[in-house]
Image (spheres, helix red, strand yellow):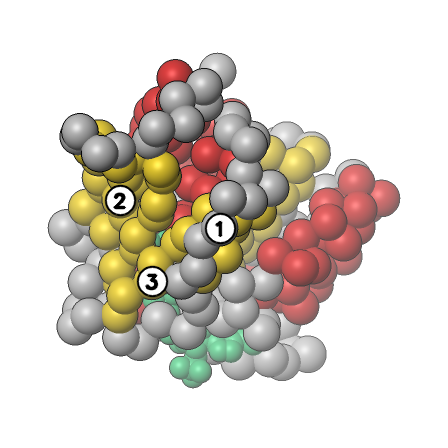
Amino acid sequence: MRIALFGYGKMGQMIEEIALNRGHEIVAKIDESTEDINFNTMDVAIDFSMPSAAYGNITKCINNNVPVISGTTGWLDDYENAVSLCNDKKGAFIYASNFSLGVNIFFELNNYLAKMMQNLPEYKVELEEIHHTQKLDAPSGTAITLAEGVISNSNYKAWKLDHSSDETLKITSKRIGKVPGTHTVEYDSVVDSIQIKHTAHNREGFALGAVTAAEWIIGKTGIFSMRDVLNLG
Ligand SMILES: NC(=O)C1=CN([C@@H]2O[C@H](COP(=O)(O)OP(=O)(O)OC[C@H]3O[C@@H](n4cnc5c(N)ncnc54)[C@H](OP(=O)(O)O)[C@@H]3O)[C@@H](O)[C@H]2O)C=CC1
Ligand SMILES: O=C(O)C1=N[C@H](C(=O)O)C[C@H](O)C1
């Protein structure tokens, strides 16, 4: 498979290593906004760039009939526009806030736990995410997906960074050293607490998931998720 990398930073480089090990070819490494891209050379594009760049990269790929996998976070105000464009152009697109197998299992666990807790008002739920100090967005995309999972199974109407009320779910973001990504969901009551936690030890799981998604999307048309790729139901 001929892969173009949009974004050749920490994730782009890790994806390159895994893709080469799986027998793929990297045909472009794009690290800045440019008009000079030959879309005919690529079978699939993988975008791990920057919040300000992702939407532009994704739309260019869709407009040039290239299936696109995006893991960039912090651009979701434009997600529905990307979906509309992809549907209009009969393209193929996957966004995931987190491509790792472990986190996608954690998402399922979070939804299941939220359903069990939804009629237990004595427990108050909060989320925490910890990432490296270079991260540009807060809260993390993964924390937003977790919050959406809690919200869709509870009376909360929205999430809020660093604040909570009866209506808003609190997300705390911490930026520490080189932490690859740690997410915790905690239900706390006067008598006890229940915590579920995912800790990434490195970036390999994210990168392997993105390459797996790129392999999976070839030949397909539509908007997909990691649930589809991993066949999680
Ligand atoms: N979904 C998931 O599983 C994961 C998502 N992420 C997300 O992926 C994104 C990238 O993370 P990471 O690799 O750690 O970040 P880095 O900062 O290490 O890399 C981002 C790269 O994008 C480049 N870039 C800047 N502008 C453009 C552009 N217009 N087109 C293409 N590339 C551009 C930067 O170049 P320069 O330095 O020259 O500006 C940089 O090399 C983040 O949004 C992060 O949150 C990260 C890990 C997992
Ligand atoms: O920026 C990162 O590094 C990560 N970003 C993603 C997010 O915002 O959830 C995924 C992972 O946690 C690493």
Above or below 200: residue 119 = above
> Mark 1 packing: few (<14 Cα in 10 Å), some, or many (20+)?
few
**Does residue 123 appear anywhere in the picture?**
yes
| Viewer-side residue, 13 vs 142 | 142
Residue at left 79%, top 40%? 87
Quadrant position of residue 132? bottom left
Q: Is residue 191 shown left or right of residue 78?
A: left
Cα distance between the residues tagged 2 and 1? 19 Å
Q: Is residue 203 shown left or right of residue 84?
A: left
Residue 79 x %, y %: 67, 52
> Mark 2 packing: few (<14 Cα in 10 Å), some, or many (20+)?
many
The numbered mark, 3 or 1, whose residue comes first in the sequence reads: 1
Q: Which residue is mark 2?
A: 184
Residue at left 19%, top 63%? 179
Asked if disc 2 is less than 8 Å from ligand 2, the answer is no
Q: Which residue is mark 3?
A: 173
Above or below 76: residue 218 = above
Label at residue 110: none
What secondary structure is found at the residue carrying circle 2? strand
The numbered mark, 2 or 1, whose residue comes first in the sequence reads: 1
Q: Amino acid at mark 3?
A: Ser
| Viewer-side residue, 222 vs 149 | 149
Q: Which residue is mark 1?
A: 165
Residue at left 26%, top 59%? 130
| Viewer-side residue, 162 vs 146 | 162
Cα distance between the residues tagged 3 and 2? 11 Å
Q: Is residue 34 shown left or right of residue 232?
A: right
Q: Amino acid at mark 2?
A: Thr
